[in-house]
Image: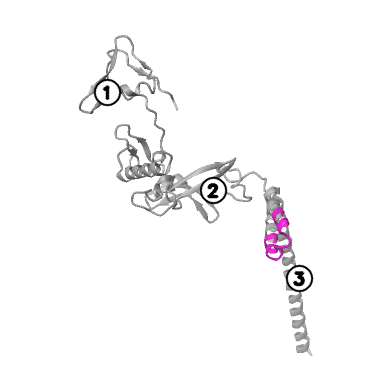
Amino acid sequence: MRERYGLNMRCLAARVNYKTLIVICAFFTLVTVLLWNKCSSDKAIQFPRHLNSGFRVDGLDKRAAASESNHYVNHGPRQQSEEAFPQEQQKAPPVVGGFNSNRGSKVLGLKYEEIDCLINDEHTIKGRREGNEVFLPFTWVEKYFDVYGKVAQYDGYERFEFSHSYSKVYAQRAPYHPDGVFMSFEGYNVEVRDRVKCISGVEGVPLSTQWGPQGYFYPIQIAQYGLSHYSKNLTEKPPHIEVYETAEDRDKNSKTNDWTVPKGCFMASVADKSRFTNVKQFIAPVLGIKLKAMHM
């Protein structure tokens, strides 16, 4: 009898311990759920209003993209209006630190932070980081990789144009001939390139700053300069030639030459036997002799 009573008491105690454990687990579960809901609500309140609208617009974009494949034919005009709607919603100011743009940087929720970029274990430059993406300054990229780029404006719209080379490929107009236009050089303007310092007034060829700022004669650039002008001479209209003086007596009746000879100066037409023509001989000790030219 005592053994049965002791066994019943142990079973009762065991049942009581299980019930207590269940109650404790339920209590902790309830507390965990309450804390989770509270944290979630706090984060939702801290979100800016424009970010919430941006997430809503993002959802609209995804739904519009999903329905595009099914209703493209029947809802062509509607698709255009739906694509314009998200652009109207994105009116929040850019949150990108240090980068200002009219349209491109107005992406909601993007935050840039400064990061050090170690280049070949030699030197460090400052970059920008957006999540897993890292951006390097183009001024460094331009010099390091020898590429080209600039910010271009088109009726108030700005965009960055990047290219590996400043040369452009033009469509061939006619079959190639050895004495004709060289490749597509009729469209080249070597003298306006960024790495052309100037056109030498003495030599008549460009001074290059390709490999140094001091300026020097670069054979490849000089060749391109000559080929471009040779090609333009074949494709463009012939230049207008205005003859002001030939020093020949037979041309005096065709055109009046308004030479201005100051006092103390002398000018006359004399025969040059070596050239079999007349030339102008002049003496101007003080003031120069002038000819009034008609500007075209």
Disc 1 marks which amino acid? Val
Q: Are the residues tagged 2 and 1 within 8 Å (C-beta)? A: no
Tell me the distance, in whole angstroms, between the alpha carbons under discs 2 and 1.
Answer: 76 Å
Quarter of image, res 246: top left
The residue singled out by tag 3 in the image is: 23
Pointer 3 local density, CA inside 10 Å: few below 14, some 14–19, many at least 20: few
What whole-number distance in Å separates the C-alpha atoms at marks 2 and 3?
49 Å
Q: Where 40 sits versus 185, above or below?
A: below
For marks 2 and 3 on the same chain, the one whose residue lies earlier in the sequence:
3
Q: Amino acid under label 3?
A: Val
* Disc 3 to disc 1, C-alpha distance: 123 Å
- Magenta-colored span: 63-81
Is 76 included in the stretch rendered in magenta? yes
Of the pair 159 and 24, the residue shown nearer to us: 159
Q: Position of residue 6 (x, y in %)?
A: 76, 85
Residue of label 2: 113
Q: Name the magenta segment's main secondary structure.
A: helix
